[in-house]
Image (cartoon, coloured by chain):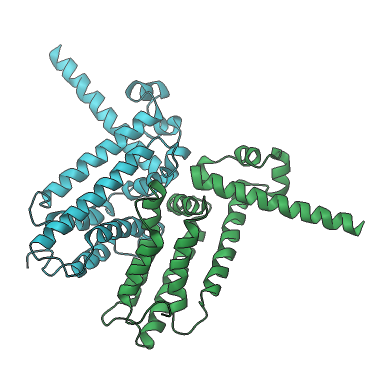
Chain colours: A green, B cyan
Amino acid sequence: MSTTTEQGYATGRARRERIIAAATELFGRVGFNGATMLEVASACSISRAGLSHHFPTKESLLEAVLETRDKEDLERFRRNGSQGTDGLGILRGMVDLAAHNSAVPGIIGLYAVLSAEAGSPDHPAHAYFISRYERIRRGTASALRRAADRGYLRAGVDQDAAAVELTAIMDGLQVQWLLDPTSVDMSAAIRRRIEELLTVPLYDA
Amino acid sequence: MSTTTEQGYATGRARRERIIAAATELFGRVGFNGATMLEVASACSISRAGLSHHFPTKESLLEAVLETRDKEDLERFRRNGSQGTDGLGILRGMVDLAAHNSAVPGIIGLYAVLSAEAGSPDHPAHAYFISRYERIRRGTASALRRAADRGYLRAGVDQDAAAVELTAIMDGLQVQWLLDPTSVDMSAAIRRRIEELLTVPLYDA
């Protein structure tokens, strides 16, 4: 009985993950506004009722999609040494994120479409994206400030302005990459700009 | 009779412009995928049949929206001296465009949402946005090259890479601005980056 229940949980978890993966792909392709729950259900071969069991609304599904991505990204930044005191780990994390995201179909489209849609105050992810960008800018500026404290930042770099700019470059490169992946090497482009700001190598030689 | 016909044309033109303005706002807010022709008709207080008379499909309406914007933007670049041989007019045009767009509700949302949606190959504006970005990158690189020919570009600036980056900054700033207009001064940010690349003032002192 206990084993059956555990199998039930495992099956439920696996199905939940499959739904989130399908929704990630669909939201990234047609947007949250353009997607329907019926399409999500059909994309992962479950019934509309089966989908509702896991996610009663499209908004709750969107929330799960964003939470899942945030957890994975946080993990990635940790692996790049984001806890380091010199700020370089965060900056390496941006390069790594650009490289990783361009290898995973759907992720870039997801953020590009959702962040643009979410500019509208009635979008369910409006508040989420406002605080997401505040967090990204604050984290990047703080990394640059820690680098500056060690003398790793070029003289005259305005840390807050550079944080806005690096964040903008990451997003803008995605738009060009989505339309034509051969037009731009995202991680090389963001890496070049970050290295221009530094007086030391971004990676150990 | 002739006057009546002319009045008819004028009314038709005015109505067409009103439809395009409403569609610009709606596409910018909910995306092309999220918008319906019924909503467009309702936003400009005409019947669905009246709308179809001017624009038989949502795709034809999208085309008219983009054409209208392109004409206005081209005009703006010309006024900034884009025909000049030193390339600076194009660069000034980018700063002016950022300032202008942030003053016109709907325009930034329109391009942010559509360019992201259009990353999907089955989007009706997919080909349009691919060639739009090719044109923007080529035009920007050519402006930087002309500036370099005069000795106006800092040594070591890779013109093609800088064109990709400036284009990315323009787009990425828009995402942050859409979510929170107080978070970023778009024209100041793009101007600062352009001026960093130059050895001469962007504007006459």
Residue A128 can be seen, yes or no: yes
Q: Residue furthest bottom?
A: A150
Q: Quadrant of the rendered structure where residue B69 is?
A: top left
Query: For this rendering, which residue is in front, A187 or A13?
Result: A187
Q: Residue at x 68, y 47 (%)?
A: A56
Q: Quadrant of the N terminus of chain A?
A: bottom right
Q: Position of residue A111 (x, y in %)?
A: 48, 54
Which residue is painted at 26% across and 80% down in the image? A156
Where residue B103 sits: x, y (%)? Answer: 27, 53
The furthest residue to the top? B1
Q: Residue furthest right?
A: A1
For this orientation, the residue located farthest to the front is A205
Is A95 in front, or is B108? A95
Residue B152 as seen in the image, left or right of residue A85: left
Q: Quadrant of residue A38?
A: top right
Q: Can you say whether A199 is above or below A16 in the image?
A: below
Instruction: Give the x, y percent position of residue A186.
Output: 39, 59
In this rendering, the answer to whether A116 lies above or below A144 is: above
B164 or A164, nearer to the observer: B164
Which residue appears at 71% of the width and 38% of the height? A47
Quadrant for the C terminus of chain A, please: bottom left
Return the x and y of residue B140 as percentages of the image width and height.
21, 54
Is B167 left, or right, of A90 in this rendering?
A: left
Q: Is residue A41 left or right of residue B28?
A: right
**Looking at the image, which residue is at 90% across and 59% down?**
A2
Specify whether residue B92 is in view: no
Count how many numbered circles sit on residues in the image.
Answer: 0
Say left or right for A85 vs B184.
Answer: right
Q: Quadrant of residue B147?
A: bottom left
